[in-house]
Structure formats: C-alpha cells, structure tokens
Image: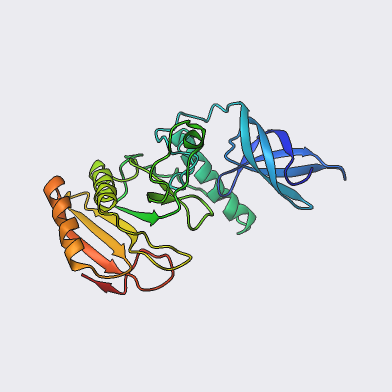
C-alpha cells in the first residue's frame, strides 16, 4: 500500500475525530490500521490512501460499496463539500453513542481509570437551526462543486463567494444560499447581503494581496428574544455604503435589532475588528 492507491476496506470501528477504522493484514504480521475519513462502522468502501506511515495509513472515501445501517440521508445539499457539518449523514442517536464511547475510551486509555460510570450523552432538542452565531466568509476564489464543474452552461460569479470555507483550504469559500445550523432569518440575511454587494460591484478582500473591502459576515440570534445582530467585517470604513447596506437589510428583513461594522486592518483572516461602527 502506498499513497494514491485505491483500496477496498471494511470499516469495523470508529475513531476520535470521526474517522472509520479498517484493519487489514500486515506484511510484517498482525494487522495494519487504516483511518478512513467519511466512513462509518458497517461500511464497505473504496478509499484513496492520503498518507502512509509505518504503523498506520489515512484514507478518504472514494465510493461507498455497501452502506452502514448508521447512515441517513443528509438534509443539506452542501454536505460533504462544506466544512460546517461533519456527521450529518449519521443517525443522530448513533452520534451520541459514539461520543459516549470516546469519552469512556479516553478515561480508560489515557487516564488509566476502570470501573467508572458515564451517563448517556445529553442530546440537543434541535438537530437543526440551533446555533445562535454563524460566521461566514467572503472570498474572490469561489470553490466550484462537482455539479457546477460538470455543467455545460456558463458558471457565473466565479470571483464572488459568501459562505463557509472548504476544510483545510484557507482562501477558497463555498458559496451557499442555505444553512441549517442557524435560523431562516440568518439565511435571508446571508442572501440579501450577497445580493446587495454583488449589485454594487464591491471588492472582496484578497488574503494574498491584502486588498479589497469585504471580509466576513457574522450573524447572532437571541433564541429567547428573536433579536438579530448583523456584523459586517470589512477592511476599511465606508459610511455611505454601510448606511445603504443597513437600510437595505432593515427594509427587507424583520427582527434585526443592530447592524455593526467591524474594521479589520490586520492581514489575519479573523472575524474581529480593530474598530467598530
């Protein structure tokens, strides 16, 4: 086995960070462990080897040959590409069971503890629309999905994205129009913000050249009050543009109680500012 190989694996258990575990015969005797990103116990998969070490390998699912009973249909169309959710395609009750098992394993293996009791993991009453805060990023390097790349039509807005980062890629963002983590109001703000700045032709901050205006969109929701705060993070202060943007949101969306503009002069890609308006 070497990096780049496609191998067929039977997933038998689950590891920390949500990786499936497969064990295959080792050429030196015993078993060789492969950690498979995106695989669950009970899956049989074809996987590409991404990293090969002496005692283990890491791989990523290429094709699911036989699906585990743990799987369920993910609700979000961006699942698998976006970095926002990791296990949306696993039955929620099973997620809680694996979390408990990982706690037990950590106490036993790392802490050396035995004969202790762990209560069941307390699950969330809501599995969607439960977050009170979301941070979205602007990017002039939009990540194109497989479906977009395979389309015969022209792909519009290649240089404008407002959404969530692709895992392990700091400068590319998946342009999304719906996220199930926060509220429908949050989705409305997300899409209205995109619509407004596209219509104005406003530049996006470039993380390599450190030029451009738009950096982040942060939305906070008070679950008990329903009040919403919008924080647009930019590279400079533009009073006229912010007044127009705020007026546009307030005219079209109910529940917004405050609109803030954080100015981030630093090169680091953080959704925080050095000054606030």
- Which x, y percent locates residue 166? 49, 50
- Looking at the figure, which quarter contains the N terminus? top right
Depth check: give the residue in front, 199 or 148: 199
Q: In this view, does 68 lie to the left or right of 89?
A: right
Q: Residue at x 21, y 53 (%)?
A: 222
Work out whether 78 lies above or below 255.
above
The colour style of the image is: rainbow
- Which x, y percent locates residue 180? 34, 40
- Which x, y percent locates residue 221? 23, 52
Work out whether 73 lies above or below 175.
above
- Which x, y percent locates residue 178? 33, 40
Mark yes or no: residue 239 visible.
yes
Q: Is residue 112 left or right of residue 227?
A: right
Residue 78 sits in quarter: top left
Residue 2 sits in quarter: top right
- Looking at the figure, which quarter contains the C terminus? bottom left
Work out whether 199 lies above or below 215.
above
Q: Which residue is drawn at 13% across and 51% down?
A: 250
Of all residues shown, which one is farthest toward the front?
154
């Amino acid at each position: 086995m070497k990096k780049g190989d496609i191998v067929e694996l039977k997933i038998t258990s689950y590891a920390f960070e949500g990786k499936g575990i497969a064990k295959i015969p080792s050429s030196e005797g015993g078993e060789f462990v492969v950690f498979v990103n995106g695989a669950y116990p009970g899956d049989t998969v074809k996987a590409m080897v991404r990293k090969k070490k002496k005692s283990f390998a890491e791989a990523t699912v290429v094709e699911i040959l036989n699906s585990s009973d743990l799987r369920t249909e993910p609700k979000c169309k961006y699942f698998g590409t976006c970095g926002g959710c990791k296990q949306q395609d696993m039955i929620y009750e099973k997620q809680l069971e694996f979390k408990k098992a990982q706690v037990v394993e950590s106490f036993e293996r790392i802490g050396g503890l035995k004969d202790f009791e762990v209560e069941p993991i307390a699950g969330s009453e809501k599995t969607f629309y439960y977050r009170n805060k979301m941070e979205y990023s602007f990017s002039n390097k939009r990540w194109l999905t497989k479906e977009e790349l395979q389309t015969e039509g022209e792909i519009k807005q290649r240089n404008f994205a407002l959404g969530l980062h692709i895992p392990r890629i700091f400068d590319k963002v998946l342009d999304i129009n719906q996220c199930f983590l926060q509220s429908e109001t949050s989705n409305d703000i997300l899409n209205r913000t995109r619509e407004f700045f596209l219509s104005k032709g406003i530049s996006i901050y470039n993380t390599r050249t450190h030029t451009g205006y738009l950096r982040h969109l942060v939305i906070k929701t008070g679950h008990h009050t329903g009040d919403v705060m919008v924080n647009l993070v930019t590279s400079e202060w533009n009073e006229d543009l912010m007044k127009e943007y705020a007026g546009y949101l307030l005219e079209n969306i109910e529940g917004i109680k405050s609109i803030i503009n954080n100015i981030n002069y630093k090169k680091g890609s953080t959704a925080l500012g050095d000054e606030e308006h």
